[in-house]
Every structure is written in structure tokens, then in C-alpha cells.
Image: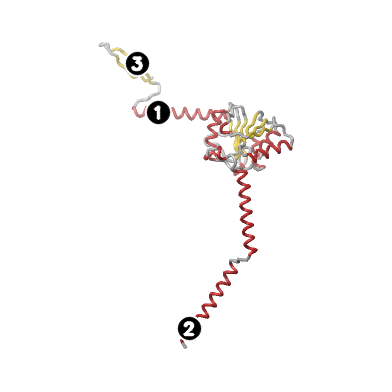
């Protein structure tokens, strides 16, 4: 009697295991078509990553890590906003990180003599090919493989940039040192910290700012003067005497020695 009952328990366990294995086969099928599909999907994703790397990575080793900016093309609204802020301007324009050249082509059609700085060889080749195909002369749209961080930009009175937040402060210092008075700087999506903008258009990811370099320099001088005044006030408060308008007058006493008297004007 006990033996019969034990055999029934073993038989029931085997049936349960068989049901579990059948369920696993339904959830995780191991048939060959699914293996082929998985392999194809992996190959496709690897190929897409390779193409993406070709466009974003070349030239990065030439740029400091904090200033690396991946390729991100401007859309129509962003390009349109940049051109709005350039209305009424003429002369030479430098596009910093020109990518596929779409902003350079838009500005050259408006009469600017443009130079696109790009270190990605693939994007540079594409932009040059498009310029030849559309018969845009190099005097209007010239694409150069140069690192704009290492290039003197003093001959350009118009600058356009679509970079990244981490690069804006460093770029601002460079432009303040090199650009001529009256130059206009147009930045898409990312603004210059502590720079007063002349005008802005768009909103969100399409917002674009225009900065007159002369106004930016004047603003910087005012801030420097305010800092110096504040520093002088702090020095005066430490000595207990005002420093503004104070002079030292040297008198002689009856013994012939020198005496210094502080005279407050």
C-alpha cells in the first residue's frame, strides 16, 4: 500500500516537471529562426553605432575633453532664428563647428562671406561636395579643417555657434580677446553665461541669442569697476576710516622731524 502511494507521488512530480519545461519553451523559444533574428538585430545595431561614431567621433582626440561637442545638426527653426538675428549685418562670418554646412549655406545666400570650421573629415567632405554640387563659390562658403579653438578669429565680425553648455564660458573668454569691436555673436540653444544679450528669438530648444561684443566688453568693465569700488569700501571699513578722497600731508614739527597728517577731503 505504501509502495503504491510512493509511485503515484513520483509520477505526479514527473508530470509537473514536464509541464514546467513545456511552459519554458513557450516563453523562451530556442528555434533557429529566432536565433537568426537576434543575430541580425545585433548586427544592425552595431552597424548603426559604427555609422554614428564616424560622424561624431573623428577629430575628438584633438580637442580637450571639456570642450568636445558631438555633431548635432540645427533644424529649420534654429537656422531661421539665427538668420533673423543676422538681419542687417554684412561682412565675414565664421561658423564654429559647421557640421554639414547648412548654416553656412544659409548665411552665404544672404551675402555673407562665410568660413565653416569643422574637424570631422566626413562632415567636411559632405559640405564641400554639396558646395561644388550647388555651385556655391569658395569665396562665399569656404569649409576648412581647422580647430577654431587654436585659430585667431579677429578678422570675423560675425560669429555663429551651436556648441554645448560646458564650452560656452571658455569660448566667451576667447571671443572677448580676439573679436573686433562691433562684432556680433549668435549662439543657438546655449547662451553665454554672464553676457548681456542684445536680442533673442525663439523659445525652448530653438531659442537663439545675439550678443554685441562691444556691449559685452562695456558690461565687463562696469563689473570690474564695481568690484574695485567694493574692495575699496571693504578696506576702508577694516581701518575704520574712509579711503575715498583721503591724502597724506607731510608737515615739519619744531624739532625738525617729519610728521604725517591724514587729511580727509
Whether residue 128 sits left or right of residue 163 in the image: it is: right
| Other-residue count near label 3 (Cα within 10 Å), few / some / many at <14 / 14–19 / ≥20 | few
Query: In the rendered image, which quarter contains the C terminus?
Result: top left
Answer with mark 1 or mark 3, whichever residue precedes in sequence: 1
- Say which element carries label 3: strand
- In the rendered image, residue 73, in percent from the top left (x then y), is placed at 63, 42
Residue drawn at 74 percent across, 35 percent down: 135
Q: Nearer the viewer, residue 206 or 164?
A: 164
Q: Nearer the viewer, mark 1 or mark 2?
A: 2
Q: Which residue is mark 1?
A: 233
Residue drawn at 52 percent across, 80 percent down: 12
Query: What is the C-alpha distance between the residues marked 1 and 2?
Result: 98 Å
Instruction: Determine contact: label 2, label 3, CB under 8 Å.
Output: no
Residue drawn at 33 percent across, 15 percent down: 250
- In the rendered image, residue 21, in percent from the top left (x then y), is placed at 56, 72
Residue 215 visible somewhere in the drawing: yes
> Which numbered tag is attached to residue 249?
3
Q: Nearer the viewer, mark 2 or mark 3?
A: 2
Q: Quadrant of residue 176?
A: top right
- Say which element carries label 1: helix
Residue lying at the far bottom of the rendered structure: 1
Q: Quadrant of residue 197?
A: top right
Q: Is residue 21 above or below residue 198?
A: below
> Which numbered tag is attached to residue 182?
none
Q: Which residue is mark 2?
A: 6
Query: What is the C-alpha distance between the residues marked 2 and 3?
Result: 119 Å
| Other-residue count near label 1 (Cα within 10 Å), few / some / many at <14 / 14–19 / ≥20 | some
Residue 102 visible somewhere in the drawing: no
- In the rendered image, residue 38, in percent from the top left (x then y), is placed at 62, 59
Amino acid at each position: 500500500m505504501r509502495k503504491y502511494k510512493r509511485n503515484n507521488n513520483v509520477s505526479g512530480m514527473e508530470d509537473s516537471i514536464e509541464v514546467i519545461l513545456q511552459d519554458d519553451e513557450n516563453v523562451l523559444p530556442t528555434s533557429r529562426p529566432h536565433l537568426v533574428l537576434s543575430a541580425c538585430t545585433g548586427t544592425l545595431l552595431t552597424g548603426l553605432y559604427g555609422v554614428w561614431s564616424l560622424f561624431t567621433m573623428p577629430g575628438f582626440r584633438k580637442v580637450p575633453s571639456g570642450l568636445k561637442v558631438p555633431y548635432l545638426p540645427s533644424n529649420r527653426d534654429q537656422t531661421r532664428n539665427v538668420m533673423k538675428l543676422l538681419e542687417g549685418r554684412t561682412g565675414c562670418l565664421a561658423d564654429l563647428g559647421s557640421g554639414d554646412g547648412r548654416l553656412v549655406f544659409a548665411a552665404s545666400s544672404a551675402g555673407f562671406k562665410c568660413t565653416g570650421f569643422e574637424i570631422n573629415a566626413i562632415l567636411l567632405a559632405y559640405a564641400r561636395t554639396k558646395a561644388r554640387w550647388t555651385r556655391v563659390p569658395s569665396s562665399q562658403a569656404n569649409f576648412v579643417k581647422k580647430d577654431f579653438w587654436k585659430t585667431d578669429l579677429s578678422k570675423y565680425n560675425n560669429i555663429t555657434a551651436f556648441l554645448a553648455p560646458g564650452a560656452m564660458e571658455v569660448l566667451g573668454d576667447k571671443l572677448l580677446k580676439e573679436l573686433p569691436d562691433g562684432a556680433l555673436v549668435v549662439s543657438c540653444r546655449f547662451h553665454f553665461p554672464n553676457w548681456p544679450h542684445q536680442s533673442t528669438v525663439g523659445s525652448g530648444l530653438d531659442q537663439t541669442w545675439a550678443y554685441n561684443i562691444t556691449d559685452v566688453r562695456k558690461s565687463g568693465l562696469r563689473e570690474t569697476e564695481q568690484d574695485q569700488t567694493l574692495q575699496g569700501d571693504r578696506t576702508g571699513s577694516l581701518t575704520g576710516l574712509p579711503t575715498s578722497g583721503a591724502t597724506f600731508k607731510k608737515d615739519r614739527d619744531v624739532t625738525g622731524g617729519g610728521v604725517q597728517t591724514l587729511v580727509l577731503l
